[in-house]
Amino acid sequence: MLKRFSLNLLQINCNIMKKLHGIVVPMVTPLTTLNAEIDYKATEKLVEHLISGGVHGIFVLGTTGEAQSLSAAQRESFVKFVGKQINGRTRYIVGVSDTSISDSVRLASVAKDAGAEGVVATPPYYFAPSQSDMVNWFTALADASPLPVYMYNMPSHVKVNVDPSTVVKLASHPNIKGLKDSSHNMTYFQTLAYLTKDEEDFVLLVGPEEQTAQAVLLGGAGGVNGGANMFPELYVKSYNAAAAGNLETVRKCQEAILHIATAIYTVGDGPSSYLQGLKGALELLGLCNRTLALPYTAMSDEKMVVLKEALGGISTDEWR
């Protein structure tokens, strides 16, 4: 009887591990200072940094990857290059958010050929879709995509929220495997966790890194955290501690994560302050330069001085 129980637990753990989980880092897109072309040498360095840091997966062409500021040719080239560099060493998913479903499906096909295991998509933007429009959109995308689809709830950028009732309708689609929530609304996240608890193949991940440990403690599958570009070990340790219910370690990691959110992401100007801070910090860490794609600008030299001081206030001793 005990042996059978142990085997059942092993099977459950194996099923969990097959699902997308843990820290799936939304990788920045390194750009050259001249003409903001993709910096492939820095990309190679960053991928190796993330894999050596133990991340559970890499997600390219999301918000942190400045996908909507890149040309279609750049996106396809980047997807292929990163897939080749990863070479199956960690899980790989690709953002295909667009206003054209045919373009999303085409990029999904490129992603499949590059070794990705899934694609991520926001609702279409510009004309804000209704909830029924979103059901139609995601259903059509999931029907046509050669890879599993993860929905991306990003109301601050696409002007609409994917309502819980809409998520429930879509969660039963065999090719829709989860949702990344960047609404910063934990009540919304908990509601989704409750309403989708019977969908065994459906996972929920949270974008805001300040909320990831809490989301995991509440049953979430993990986090898609931009700060993991800088310090992947920190976010992996925080996830592992939350998954194991080790609240003391969570508390220690959370202090560093909150310092990053308040001291690194707030130095820049305007809506792109997060990206300015993140890429500025990556330049200081020697991983890529601070260039942002138009229309956004890199952090100024004056503010880089402030950023360097803020970055120096982060102690890595507790998670390395």
Image (cartoon, rainbow, N blue to C red):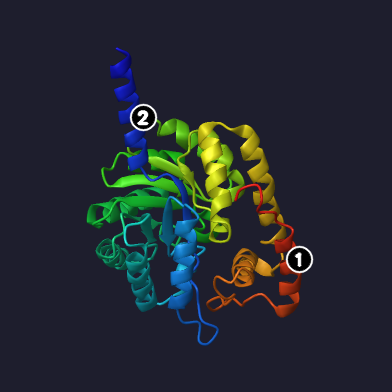
The residue at the point 46 percent across, 37 percent down is 192
Question: Of the numbered discs in the image, which one, if any, rests on residue 309?
Answer: 1
Q: Is residue 122 visible?
A: no
The residue at the point 30 percent across, 39 percent down is 172
Q: Position of residue 219 (x, y in %)?
A: 48, 34
Tell me the quarter of the image containing the N terminus: top left
Check disc 2 and report the residue beneath it.
198
Report which quarter residue 2 is drawn in.
top left
The answer to whether 63 appears left or right of 90 in the picture is: right
Q: Position of residue 273 (x, y in %)?
A: 65, 66
Q: Position of residue 249 (x, y in %)?
A: 62, 38
| Residue in the foreground of this view, choosing between 313 and 103 | 313
The first of marks 1 and 2 along the sequence is 2
Of discs 1 and 2, which sits in the foreground? 1
Q: Position of residue 29 (x, y in %)?
A: 48, 70
What is the C-alpha distance between the residues marked 1 and 2? Answer: 47 Å
The residue at the point 72 percent across, 68 percent down is 308
In the picture shown, does residue 35 fall above or below 207?
below
Q: Amino acid at mark 2?
A: Asp
